[in-house]
Image (tube, coloured by chain):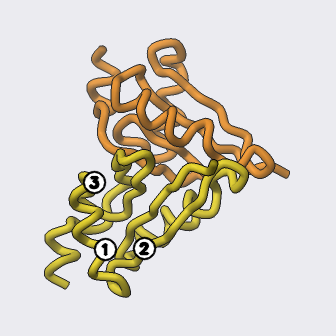
Chain colours: A orange, B yellow
Amino acid sequence: MKTKAIFYHAGCTVCVSAEQAFAGSLDPARFDVEVVNFAESPARIGEAEAAGVVSVPAFVIHGTPFHINFGASMAEVKGS
Amino acid sequence: MKTKAIFYHAGCTVCVSAEQAFAGSLDPARFDVEVVNFAESPARIGEAEAAGVVSVPAFVIHGTPFHINFGASMAEVKGS
């Protein structure tokens, strides 16, 4: 069974860079990658925060948040 | 030709978590991953800093640094 990896972002420049480097780079034989753009899916903000995401871009893998560089805080995401 | 992805770390807990999540997860058909532990290879610190690495753990892919969460600053790495 593949591991679910969710990449959360907000369309920022830093987010796009991280998406290009990682979201399409995980081994497709082992990972099922979902890309969530909060600008399009604000309803997903709650699940990301519950998993510990405090800024974007970030992955959540096995329930653990991995923030990649810094694009925007979740406060900024919610205020935008 | 595979893309070179270098994962720099310093053996910290945050580093190990990021290594387990990402260093072995990139598509082996497209990436050649090298793991560098500064505690074992302090001579590699200069190349990492030149690429823009300011904290560990971090990847450098195509010359671009991607810091994953925060384990330790490069100043702490050099001071340890």
Residue displayed at 56% across by 57% down = B22
Q: Secondary structure at mark 3?
A: loop
Q: Secondary structure at mark 2?
A: strand
The extreme front residue here reads B1
Chain of the residue that carries numbered disc 3 in the rendered image: B
Residue A54 horizontal/vertical position (percent):
35, 41
| Residue tagged 3 | B51
Q: Secondary structure at mark 1?
A: helix
Looking at the picture, which amino acid does disc 2 mark? Answer: Val
Marks 1, 2: nearer the viewer: 1
Residue B72 horizontal/vertical position (percent):
26, 68
Dot 1 or dot 2, earlier in sequence: 2
Looking at the picture, which amino acid does disc 3 mark? Answer: Ala
- Which label was assigned to residue B36? 2
| Residue tagged 1 | B44
**Do tag 1 and tag 2 residues touch (Cβ < 8 Å)?**
yes
Residue displayed at 35% across by 45% down = B64
Q: Is residue B57 above or below residue B43?
A: above
Horizontal side of A31 relative to B50 (left or right) equals right
